[in-house]
Image (cartoon, helix red, strand yellow):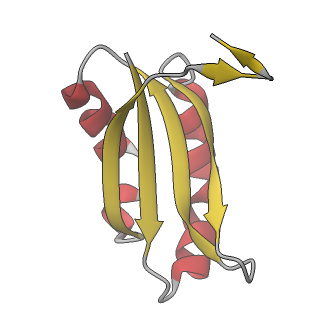
Amino acid sequence: MLFAVLFEDHTTQADEVRRQHMQAHLDFLGRNASMITDAGPLRNADGAAAGGLWLVSAETHDQVDRLVREDPFWPTGLRKSVRVLTWQQVFARGVRL
């Protein structure tokens, strides 16, 4: 099953938290690349960091929840909210699947 994970970040001291923990976060993504197939930051219209998005392949919602809580960003308080939604891809590169 595919999941979209949407993170909204706190803005207070978020840049400093990202700088301090980015390498550990990227290492975590690499270790979990078999499940977290795509990941990247989300930005507001003014370019300010707003959160992140993961596409995750997992069997259950609980597996995704565990991944979220194992991310080195999680215990820092950076994340203001997280939404885990199932996702079904129906269109890719100009073609209906």
| Residue 84 in the image, given as x and y percentages of width and height | 32, 42
Residue at left offset 61%, top offset 30%:
30
Residue 72 in view of the camera: no
Residue at left offset 50%, top offset 84%:
11
Residue projecting furthest to the front? 96
* Residue 19, above or below 94: below
Residue at left offset 26%, top offset 38%:
65
| Residue 9 in the image, given as x and y percentages of width and height | 45, 71
Residue projecting furthest to the left? 62
Residue projecting furthest to the bottom? 12
Q: Using the image as rendered, state which of residue 20 and residue 58 is in the foreground.
A: 58
Q: Quadrant of residue 95?
A: top right
| Residue 73 in the image, given as x and y percentages of width and height | 44, 58
Residue at left offset 47%, top offset 89%:
12
Quadrant holding the C terminus: top right
* Residue 39, above or below 58: below
Q: Using the image as rendered, state which of residue 32 and residue 45 is in the foreground.
A: 45
Residue projecting furthest to the right? 94
Q: Is residue 94 left or right of residue 59?
A: right
Quadrant holding the N terminus: top left
* Residue 61, above or below 11: above
Residue 81 in view of the camera: yes
